[in-house]
Image: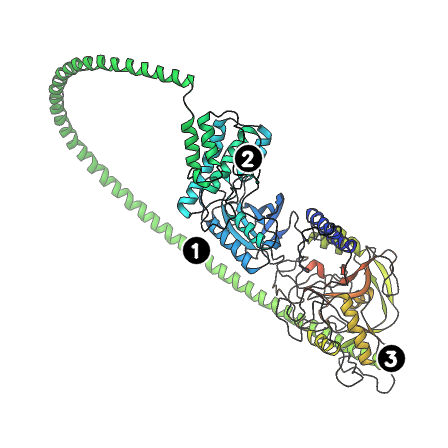
Amino acid sequence: MMQTARDKIRELRALHDDGLLSLQEFDRRKNAILDAEYAPPGGSVTAAPPVRQGTELGLMSGQEIGPQNRRYRLERLIGMGGMGQVWQATDLATHAELGHSDMVALKILPPQLTQSATHAKLLIEEATQARKLAHENIVRVYEWAQDPATSSYFIIMEYLEGQDLDAYLAEQGPLPLEAIYRLLTPVGDALQYAWDKHKLVHRDIKPGNVFLTQRGEIKLLDFGIASRARSAGSSLGLQTPNAGTVGYRAPEAGTHQRQPSPKLDVYAVAVMIYQLLEGRMPFDDMRPADFHPSPPQGLNPAQWKVLQNGFAYAQERRPASVSELLTELRRADGPSEEELATQARQAQERERQRQSEQTAHAEAKAAQAEQARAAEQKRQALAAELAARRQAESQAAAAEKVKLDQQRRALEAKQRAEAETAALARKQALREQLQARRDADAKQAREEREEQQRKAAQLKAEAAYRSEQERHRKQQAERNAAELAALMPTAGSPVADANGVLRDRFVDGTGVGPDLVLIPTGRFQMGSHEHEQAAAIKAGAQKNWLERETPQHWVGIEHSFAMGRSPVTVGQWRQFVRATGWESQSDTDWRAPGFAQTDEHPVVGVSWVDAQLYVRWLSEQTGQTYRLPSEAEWEYACRAGTKTAFSFGDAISTEQANYDGHYTYNGSPRGAYLQGTNKAGTFQPNPWGLFDMHGNVWEWTQDVVHDNYIGAPADGSAWEEGGDQVRRVLRGGSWLYNPRYLRASVRNGFSAVLANDIVGFRVARKLV
């Protein structure tokens, strides 16, 4: 079934309203759909990139992405373009050895650049190579990573505050040559370093890739990564035929050179110098070989010749490097009148200094003779003074020795007394420590006995609770079996076993239907109350999700029915496929959805339309009436007489259901994350014997999606009038979602014709 443009846009709007798609991503995809729908005959419109169903489909502030051990929280969208999105983000697990702060920039690459293993490998190699560029004028690339939830690749980089040269030029206007030297000399140093150390060429020099930080630093951005991504994009048919940017791209760029030359960057920097002087480009990317722009203001003829050589059509005429281009420009800048006057003043000053030095030399020679006579007299006086001092020092040393001996003996006596006092103090301290340790050991032993007694009492209570639950379950199974027997009194009707499980045999004797349990009549309150919503908001739920669960209202289930004990399994679906020749129309392969499955796992990759084909086939095989449960019947069966968020209480753990255990709910502990489905019957059933009502897979129901319960039926029947006819209601949460989505009252919706790796279904059966 093909979707119209209106249906596709309505589905995108629903994803945006659910908080799964950012506004920018919604607008981009909507425009792509409209372009494809209304493209002129023969026109070429780039198709919107395929969306992987079953994962978080958009990016927004506060979202966490990245692998489990390297998580990042998105803070602010910095920019967007053909290379994807750049976000300011907080590194939630900073390692000291990386040498960077916890605020980073994430370049999240679009999926069309990494959808094949070859292109992803090229980007990873380029990011790894860029990490080697350790230069003060090149933005640091720390690492690359892949987000497991969206399969998106992203590059972690140094976060900078400031503006690029494009913004600076728009703010300041044309610049003088000295200012241009100040801005581009660090760029030349960075490019020279990359070539000398790693034989790397930037290949995309332009004002947008030169960044001026708030601290006055010059940083070169996108070193090589943009070029590699463009190469990958070109092979995918994207509109990036050559490396570089129009206007700054050298004529030989994109001609499959074996080794890119630094002269590619020389060309781009020469174009930038002209642009910074004039405020405009010298020519566009379609320049002919014989085109020459008019000379810019502020250059003499020699400088203009150097600049023309810089962006010469033939690369042989260009300087070998950007640093050489800037050096030649400076060398061609002749001295000004002011500089000539300065040079003359300097020459006069040097002559005055020479004459002064000659006069000082003569005076110094006379002074040296006088100083020699004075020095001899001073030497003789010092010799006499030294002899007298030595005699005095000898006498003083003898007296000092006597004094030191007396002080030493007194000090030794004092130290012996202090040592004895310290020894007594240590003995007393050791006695006190020993007593304190004995007291602590006694207290610890007492606390351990009390803890063992408490745990023993808890285990006894839990055993009693499980025994009571098992007794209650058996009683319920016996009542269900009796009620089923009463509802189906005719000879040959299927009969429930001792556990209250009903199985319909196929009319032709080739098999049996899914295991069913009786769902009795009764009344319950459908939806969530204020206390449950407060706990859900604390766990991260959004108000527009919670409004779907209101108003809370009473529903009466007037007729007993049977319901699948677990979702339809892979083995049961395989039997249907063999019998009917059904073929999937989904991108998700139900036989290999991306994680391990056996015949006992719930089937995924099945749309609502496919589920309708299955229940129709099952009805024909058994002679009974099978269908999907209504949304009210599903919640009634899930709660099984309880009023809490889950059928086993207001908290949940991964020992009770299959979900992303990295997240918690209402004080529950963190747990495992299987990253796929589990077998039917892995966890304990609810009080009515139903397995996996919380987590594992979302389950289709019969109802059309409505924004809330206003106008909903009160008799438990399916609500198929009005609402969004394109989408059908999903219930129960899945292995991919966090625990707040597993509450019994949570409502979700999805296109009836689409399927993915987190959605399955279970059947219902009419009894009378």
Looking at the rendered structure, the secondary structure element under dot 2 is helix
Residue at numbered disc 3: 487
Q: Which residue is rendered at x = 41% and y = 21% of the image? A: 335
Please say if 242 is above or below 525: above
For marks 1 and 2, the one nearer the N-term is 2
Looking at the rendered structure, the secondary structure element under dot 3 is helix
For marks 3 and 2, the one nearer the N-term is 2
Residue at numbered disc 2: 165
For marks 1 and 3, the one nearer the N-term is 1
Is residue 479 visible in the rendered image? The answer is: no
Instruction: Decide: few, some or many residues near mark 3? Use Cα within 10 Å; few <14, some 14-19, many ≥20.
Output: few
Please say if 683 is above or below 151: below
- Say what amino acid the circle numbered 2 marks: Leu
Q: CA distance from mark 1 to mark 2?
A: 69 Å
Quarter of the picture holding the N terminus: bottom right
Q: Are marks 1 and 2 in contact (CB under 8 Å)?
A: no
- Say what amino acid the circle numbered 3 marks: Leu
Q: Position of residue 517 (x, y in %)?
A: 78, 75
Colour setup of the view: rainbow
Please say if 164 is above or below 124: above
